[in-house]
Amino acid sequence: MKNTYLKITLLTLFLMLFSCSEEKFTGEDYGTVEGKVVSAIDFKPLANVKVFSNPNTSIVFTDDEGKFVINNVKVGDYSFEAQKEGYIVKFEAATVNTDKTSKIVFELKLSTTNNKPPTTPVLIKPLDNATDQTLDLNLTWTATDIEKDSLKYEISLRKENSDDVVIYPNISKTNFTLKGLNYSTKYYWQVSVSDGINPVVLSAVRSFTTTAFSSARFLFVKKSFENNVIYSGDDSGTQLRLTSLDVNSWRPRKNNQIKKIAFIRASGAQNHIYTMNPDGSGIFKVTNSIPIAGFNSDFLNFSWNTSGSQIIYPYFDKLYRINSDGSGLTKIYQTPNGKFISECDWSNDGSKIALKVNDSNGYNAEIYVISTTGVILSQVWSGTTGAMGGLNFSITGQKLVFTRDVSGYEDANYRQLDTRVFQYVFSSNTASEISLEKPAGTVDLDVRYSPNEAELIIMNTSNDGVSTKNIVKYTPAANTTTGVSRTILFTNASMPDWE
């Protein structure tokens, strides 16, 4: 009997052991956690970051790529923690599943605890309100950081009367050279400094003015994509852009008495006359209710009076006078036959106005002179085919230069084949060609007298209509010491003015 009980007991224990070996208790399943730690600023990997969890698992450190792996983590919910000196501790939750890999990404922010910001930058050069500064200007300043943190600087630059701010970022030194500044322009500049930890620190705002662009007696237009852009230039070929690349502006005319430049600018579906200062600032819209208009906007012209108080301009078959402040709009002439007025020029003494009129295609052209009350005084040219233009009185008003296509060619595109310069002399009522030694196959357009009338300025280009346009100065043989009568002043340029 005793042996029987012993056998039963041993059998029971055996069955209990067998049953336990087949059952898994909760918490004995495992998974893997892997992840990466990066900077929250630039998302670059961070090495040697301590990573562990609650409940506790193994403690690991990230490698050079910011990666870490924790193996044999019991299934369950965890809060993982990433620690690195100089950074704020970050927590991320994760659920570990059986034989699965859970992934975590930590983005650590720099700790600002006990870190001092850089000192306020002090602007050294140029001095505040400095004038006559070069167009390539070196700016210098100072700033320090007590912890010797790596500093990055940023320059903000703005022109006077403009809301556009140019930013020069990621500067590591305490000096920077600005290049390609504009002449006669006042600039405001400011430096900001960052240590990558604290908020950016700003300097005071200082100003400087660049050197004046003296001897800029020439004005002309250059093409920028679809827009015309106005420039000024001097005898050495130096150029200064006066109008925006984003706005269509053309036909500049300077008045030295009031030191203003008038020009045509596209304004919506219309073209209007504006004025500006010689450096391109102070833009003012003169015309409003009546725009400047004619058969082709590229061949429209207007004229100042000598004092700069008034401007005359065409509107199809009518000629208007307006004060340069935009007041006093008055119609002073209308063509009797409905022809369009395309160009006009006001004599220096203010007594007469030269007009070029044409049909709606630009042809059947005439040039004649009227008084300021609209009375026709003299007929300069009529009765020929082909294009005409480029009116300009001499100082005395006794001569008038203009251009005419002697080929007489006419087509829908207003192409000119052999346009030459002519001069009308009022005392003899005669017009004759001025031989400017024009190269064959080219046209001379937009002729004007030089300020001393010893020379002429023109735009010359191939008659193919697509080649480069050049501003050319013509000096008569008797007035040149070099033997060269035609000198190119500016390339890829048109619509010259010389005052």
Image (cartoon, rainbow, N blue to C red):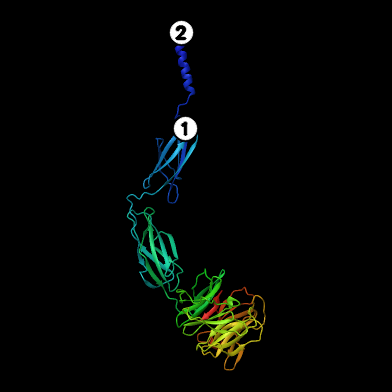
Is residue 484 found left or right of 4 in the rendered image?
Answer: right
N-term-proximal mark, 2 vs 1: 2
Give x and y (percent) for residue 84: 38, 45
Q: Nearer the viewer, residue 196 or 11?
A: 11
Residue 499 visible here: no
Query: Label 2 to label 1, Cα distance in Å?
Result: 44 Å
- According to the image, label 1 marks what residue? 30
Q: Which mark is residue 4?
A: 2
409 up-or-down from 11: above or below: below
When asked about the image quadrant of residue 79, the answer is top left
Residue at the extreme top of the image, as rendered: 1
- In front: 383, or 6? 383
Residue 230 screen position, x and y as percent: 51, 74
Find numbered disc 1 in the image and state the secondary structure of the residue it sits on: strand
Q: What residue type is labelled 2?
A: Thr
Q: Between residues 244 and 195, which one lies in front from this camera angle?
A: 244
Q: Quadrant of residue 177?
A: bottom left
Amino acid of disc 1: Tyr
Q: Residue 310: tell me if it is visible.
A: yes
Q: Is residue 484 left or right of residue 89?
A: right
Residue, x 48% and y 20% (percent of image)? 19
How far across and how far down the image is residue 496, in percent?
Answer: 54, 79
Whether the residues at callouts 2 and 1 have beta carbons within 8 Å, the answer is no
